[in-house]
Image (cartoon, rainbow, N blue to C red):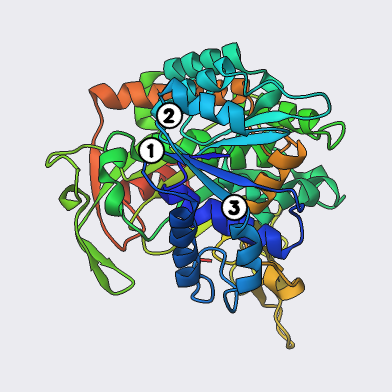
Amino acid sequence: MVFGANGDLTRRLLVPALYNLVGQGLLPDGFQVLGVDHTPGGPQDLRQRLKDFLRSTVGHGGEGSEPAFDEARWRWLAQRIDYLAGDFEDAATYERLAHTLKGPAVFYLAAAPRFFGDIVERLSRAGLLRADAGGFRRVVIEKPFGHDLSSARTLSRRILKWADEAQVYRIDHFMGKETVRNILALRFANAVFEPIWNRHTIDHVQITAAETVGVEARGGYYDHTGALRDMVPSHMFQLLGLVAMEPPNSLDAEAVRAEKGRVIAAIDVQSPAQALANSVRGQYHAGRVDGAPVDAYRQAADVAARSRTETYVALKLTIDTWRWAGVPFYLRTGKALSARDTEITIQFKAAPGGLFRDIPGPQSPNRLVLQLQPREGMDLSVDIKQPGPEETLAPVKLAFRYADAFTLPAATGYEPLLYDAMTGDRTLFRTAREIEASWQAVEPFLKAWATGGRVHAYAAGSAGPKAADALLARDGRAWRALGP
């Protein structure tokens, strides 16, 4: 059941993901989708809107893209899509659901965050969260889960008053990407990496989530949110958690989630003064991205004319654990940048000694780059001797791309998450404690920025504000250039 059936998330990501799961043969014959929204209409209206969107993207490079739209696959899914027009805050909506719904169910909250608590409470009051023997009732909650530590705690208390923790699946779609899911295998299934994955050999870690798109039609939402709230305590901390966590004692969901939660809870909570010194905010002004003109952020619809909301943020964080003592983690994310690039860079320390100090050619520390998008894979940079009689070093990349090694099904990133929610695997979903620890780590930045600090301008189509380069330069380091 999808609350928010006519919304952008449902149309652009959830239904294409279900369409892809049908193609993979992972949905049972008894599968049904019931869309709930306030828009008047019937199931045929919803089916037609969803089909029109899928037709416009499948085969045209959009989300869930494949060579051609599969009519038979869509027909299988469309026959199982129904619609209920009703207000999320009206008890009558849930009474009608209670008379209709039988058997196991997953309630997907693809609605505005202000409805999360109301929907869960009303589901419970109507008896819709009580499962029959051998069945289940689960609730999937999208981000943002709160807008600061206090609101996250309040929302968590309210939800857990009406639902058991085991029923709640807090989703982060970054966790559905193959490279993200491969981090555990890379670290713990390969003996070559785990012994060197620590402060003794790693100089620093960079986590980047760069977008070429601007705020577009989301100005009303974004101007009250900003890059920090939108990306850091959710997507970027999930990546940090997987990169920095200790080995779990098994691949059991709770074991993995516990270790990831522990490392996020170990992020040093900075003072306001430290937060100002260890952060950079930016906001894009007019420029060109991929040759096309882009208006300044403040020119977007529903954005305040003198807005100080950041569209770019760079942070320096540290983690108070034995493994990571003294190793800085640099995070950056922004809109209207020069390249679409989501990646994790593990920068190793330089080789000790001066054995090659007099040898021509650059000598570069090893670097492992885990590329999440646009081309999922990884690169390991090493120095080798150039062919020939002279002793000359040259940097090379040992490269792997998923698309080169495997035949990949079309994917939006939501497929494994939807499948796991239906099968009850909570490994890729966040705990309440983890969410609260994430907000606790970013709260000093929110407080510091509320009373001080500069918002640096950067041109759309650039790599971000120059101050972000200075954040690393003062430590003798530099960002990896944007682009896969």
- Sequence-wise first label, 1 or 3: 1
- What amino acid is labelled 3 in the image? Thr
The residue to which callout 2 is attached is: 88
Give SS at disc 2: loop
The residue to which callout 1 is attached is: 38
Mark 3 touching mark 2, by CB under 8 A? no
- Sequence-wise first label, 1 or 2: 1
Give SS at disc 1: loop
How many numbered circles does the render carry?
A: 3
- What amino acid is labelled 2 in the image? Phe
Residue, x 60% and y 22% (percent of image)? 432
- What amino acid is labelled 1 in the image? His
Q: Is residue 367 left or right of residue 134?
A: left
State whether residue 263 is above or below residue 160: below
**Between marks 1 and 3, how big is the CA–CA gap?**
44 Å
Q: How crowded is mark 1: few (under 14 residues within 10 Å), some or many (20 or more)?
A: some
Nearer the observer, 94 or 297: 94
Q: In this view, does 451 lie to the left or right of 200?
A: left
Residue, x 57% and y 19% (percent of image)? 126
**Between marks 3 and 2, how big is the CA–CA gap?**
43 Å
Image coordinates for residue 54, horizontal then vertical, percent: 50, 66
**Between marks 1 and 2, how big is the CA–CA gap?**
7 Å
